[in-house]
Image: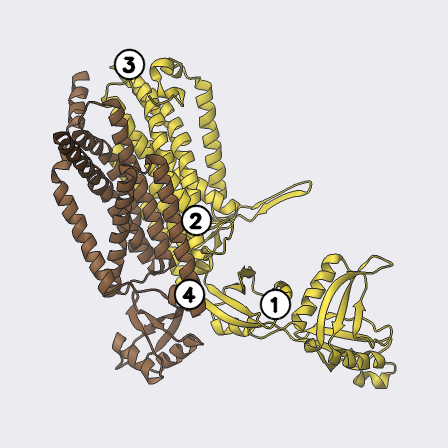
Chain colours: A yellow, B brown
Amino acid sequence: MATIKHCWLKPQLCGYNHSIMRKQKLFGRLVAIVVISFLSLYISLPRRIPVNLAVGKWQLEKTFFLPGIGWKLGPLSFSRDLQIKQGLDLKGGTQIVLEAQVLDVPESERDSALESAKTVIARRIDLYGISESVVQTAKNGQTYRLIVELPGVTDVNEARALIGQTAKLEFWEMPQAETESQQSQAQPQPTDLTGQDLQKAAVEFDQTSGEPVVSLVFTDEGRDKFAEITKRNVGQRVGIYLDGTPLTVPVVQVPITDGRAIISGNMEVKEAKQLAISLNAGALPVGMTIVKETNIGATLGKESIEASIRAGLVGLLAVATFMIIVYRKLGILADIALVIYGLLTMAIYKLFPITLTLPGVAGFLLSIGMATDANILIFERLKEELARGLPLRAAVELGFGRAWDSIKDANVTTLLIAFILYNPFEWQFLNTSGMVRGFALTLTIGILISLFTGIVVSRTLIRIFYVNDQKEKSKKQ
Amino acid sequence: MIKKKKAKNNELMKQINFMKLIPLYFSISGAAMAIGIFSLIVWRVQPAIDFVGGSLVEVELQDQEGNTVNEGAIRSALFDKEIEANSIQPAGEKRWLIRSKMSENIDKYVQSALAEKFSRVEVTRFESIGPALGKELLSKTFFGITLSSLGILLYVAHRFGGGKYGVCAVLAMIHDSLVVLGAFSLLGHFHGAEIDALFVTALLTVLSFSVHDTIVVYDRIRENLRKFPQEKFEPLANRSVNETMKRSINNSLTIIIMLVILTLLGGATVKYFSLALLTGTITGTYSSPFVAVPLLVVWNRLEERNKKSKNRN
């Protein structure tokens, strides 16, 4: 015999308890559901709501702005602007995947070379002023890649130009003007010392003060060049420029002839690290080749959003209508649960936040179809139990209990597949494509929330609005 | 009131003898699989640039006087500039998909080549993937499929053991993947549908549906077996199918409604993805009562026949 897991499995034993099911507890649940729904509704609403109402003479034309969330509790802070994050395929933009030519770079330095390249490219993009751009490193076995996402950049050539070149590190002489007449000659002058001559830059700590410093080691050729420059410029500044912008402008204290220099000054460890990475970027110009380009025009992105919203609304309406036609009153309750499901999901997308892509939207819509599954399982069980002649309340509880086992089972395999597709541990032998992951993520979230709305929300609604209502009806008769 | 209810109950209990038509189901499935396998062998599938590398340019074109936009006109415009196009397909109004093995700056070349023949050329989408990356994705996808199938197999084994239930559930799953793959091989041959990473995603998702649908029916069969140990297997299996049919159809219908709408309205990017999910959901729903259960029934018949002949001996 099956073991008794839930007390509602045996209504003959404790069904009576349920019939005097603490009304308070039920009411408490309803209140919690309502509160969560309204919170989700608030989060789900667009942040900018234009209102244009005209009733007779009275007119209201105003745009309401809803604020985001910003909490701070000691060291913990949580802030969200509560905007839907759109992936490149919705927003339009360019993604470029670059592969570093690491063959001539020693294995131990490949990671830092990739890191340097990332810093340089990120800096270029920043200079260019592209908001929400992303530069990610992706190491996979022996391949070292950078994934660059440029939202809003719809011209691939522009994007290519932006990141195509390798970083250029230069040393500039910056003579100080001693007299007015020398002013014209005192312009900063590039020297023949470049990133090619720098062997390595690293963060070290000053042995006496303990402050972080950046050490430079030049190649043999670089040593001679650097010696020349420092001899000429004792007491003066020598600027180190990366791609034409000064990184640091240290003063030369003494001529340096051994090819080893230290840049000191009030630096935080983080700053020093950043400087070393930037210097290495010039020092280790890793060749980068483009292995993948994706470009979505702004019009296509806009169309995709419109298509998704249209499909979503039509689909939701169709499913809701279907449920009402097939299950009547129970269908209405299921639809309410479905709306709550939609609100909750949207709120979670915004809170995490989750970047929505087109397949992600498909995953969301698919999960709406699946969300009704829990309800259908329960309703069909309920009908069966009623057909067997069980009283309504017992049938409801038994239906839920039995259905729950099937619902659990039904979702295990889908969750398993979604897990493999999402690849949360970034296993190298599995896919890491953004599209596939977007789908897997929204599908997983959808299933989990649908379990909640299917079991908790629907059950509470049915207990309150269906069971009680039917009781009253039968009393009247 | 009570009488009315009882009458309704009887109606509910009325059963259709689904198991009578087992040969029909097997012929339908057999035919679907045969067509699919034929297409897979003869035409194979159209792999997307995800897997083989290359580039895809989507352009929006407007006619110029004396030059209506059609495949031939585009092909000749590209040919004049020595751009090798693997395929040229319409993608909605005024839009065309051009696929090519070339990748370096192909979007620029295509744009300038077409600008000479048509009045307005806009590149709405562009994708280019190096061959090495394609190979890598292919092997990753292979691992993904292997791991997923293994996971599902383990789950089925956990639920049903290695016995007939497990084997039949897996056979039904193979049936579903063959149907979806076959459908896309045909679609690829006649409509240029491609197998990309998203298709594989759809296929795996569909497999999970298929298994879950089968699990629901099988669970009912085992529940009934426990309840009515005296009953013969075939009517019992039939009753289980009857009992779960409505739930199964209603549930799949909500998913199918969503997917049909998504295929029609969701835009070009997810059209084939939705279609793969749709095909899979339909065959997955069909296969549980009409493949998985009949397989079990036939298995049982064979078992009994064996027993009888042993007894005779």
Give the spatial CA distance, label 3 vs label 2: 53 Å
SS at mark 1? helix
Q: Which of marks 3 and 2 is nearer the N terminus?
A: 2
Q: Which chain carries label 3?
A: A
Q: In this view, does B9 lie above or below A217?
A: above
Quadrant of image for the C terminus of chain A: top left
Task: Give how far apart the Cα atoms at labels 1 and 3 are.
Answer: 77 Å
Q: Where is residue A294 in the image (x, y as percent from the top left)?
A: 44, 66
Q: What residue type is labelled 2?
A: Ile
Which three-letter amino acid code belongs to the residue tagged 1?
Ala
| Residue A260 appears in the picture as rendered | yes
User: Which comes before the other along the chain, label 1 or label 3?
Assistant: 1
For this view, does A223 lie left or right of residue B235? Answer: right
Question: Is the N terminus of chain A in the top left, top right, bottom left or bottom right quadrant?
Answer: top left
The CA distance from mark 4 to mark 3 is 69 Å
Looking at the image, the residue that sits furthest to the front is: B313
Which of the chains bears the disc numbered 1? Answer: A
Say which quarter of the image contains residue A462: top left
The residue mark sitting in front, 1 or 4, is: 4
Labels 4 and 3 in the same subunit: no
Q: Which residue is drawn at 77% across and 61% down?
A: A204
Q: What residue does disc 2 label?
A: A420
In three-dimensional space, the C-alpha distance between marks 2 and 4, rounded to whole angstroms, equals 20 Å
Work out whether disc 1 and disc 3 sit on a shared chain.
Answer: yes
**Which residue is rendered at x = 34% and y = 71% of the image?**
B99
| Number of the label disc, if any, that sits on residue B134 | 4
Helix, strand or loop status at disc 4: helix
